[in-house]
Amino acid sequence: MKTRFLSTLFTMLSFLIISCSSDQNDGGGAIGGGGDPIKLSNKKVTFSSEANSVTITSQSKWWKLNDLRINDERFGFNSEIAAQQSFILQYNEFKIERKDGTTIIININKNTTNQDRTLVVTLQEGNYLDYINIIQSK
């Protein structure tokens, strides 16, 4: 009886471990796994120190803006506005515009600092987080 119980317990644990593991590495940031629901057209952009702009598209309309940072300095915003299908957020260093739910236009001003700048735009859809990294030279 004891051997049968241990054998059944071992079998159930084995099935649990096998069913929870995955050989896929989709690079997604979903808590609990899953694919990339946002599907950005570009996730990394490099600019010179001059003012520049980039347009990035997503396949999904259901994401919202989660976080904005330049070199770890966080920029605040109204989360209700950032979840809308169209919005404009204007700051001294950059501007982010969302159009029709799937188009993101990022304008970054001339870098007058004496260091490279990294703008990180974090998007969220459900539990999935995706990042746009813009590196601007000094």
Image (cartoon, rainbow, N blue to C red):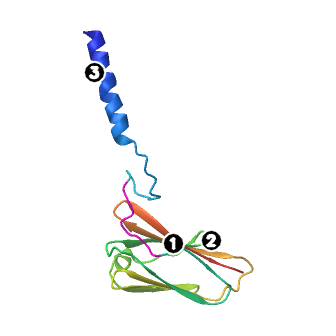
| Side of 104 where 101 appears, left or right | left
Among the two numbered marks 3 and 1 on one chain, the one whose residue lies closer to the N terminus: 3
Which quadrant: the N terminus? top left
The residue beneath circle 3 is 8
The x and y percentages for residue 115 are: 72, 77
Among the two numbered marks 2 and 1 on one chain, the one whose residue lies closer to the N terminus: 1
Whether residue 91 appears in this view of the structure is no
The residue beneath circle 2 is 71
Which segment is the magenta one? 34-41
Q: Residues within 10 Å of mark 2 (few under 14, many from 20)?
A: few
Kind of residue sitting beneath label 3: Thr
**Which of these two is toward me, 72 or 23?**
23
The x and y percentages for residue 117 are: 65, 76
Kind of residue sitting beneath label 1: Lys
CA gap between label 2 and label 1 equals 17 Å
Kindly check if marks 2 and 1 are in contact, taking CB atoms under 8 A apart as contact: no
Kindly check if marks 2 and 3 are in contact, taking CB atoms under 8 A apart as contact: no
CA gap between label 2 and label 3 equals 53 Å
Please give the label number shown on residue 43: 1
The x and y percentages for residue 31 are: 39, 54
**Which of these two is toward me, 102 or 88?**
102
Q: Main secondary structure of the magenta part?
A: loop
In the rendered structure, does residue 74 fall within the stretch colored magenta?
Answer: no
- Which secondary structure, mark 3? helix
The residue drawn where x is 60% and y is 88% is 109
Among the two numbered marks 2 and 3 on one chain, the one whose residue lies closer to the N terminus: 3
- Which secondary structure, mark 2? loop
Please tell me whether residue 135 is drawn above or below residue 2 in the rendered image: below
Q: Name which quarter of the figure residue 84 lies in.
A: bottom left
Q: Residues within 10 Å of mark 3 (few under 14, many from 20)?
A: few
Q: For the residues carrying marks 2 and 1, which lies nearer the camera in this image? A: 1
Q: Name which quarter of the figure residue 110 lies in.
A: bottom right
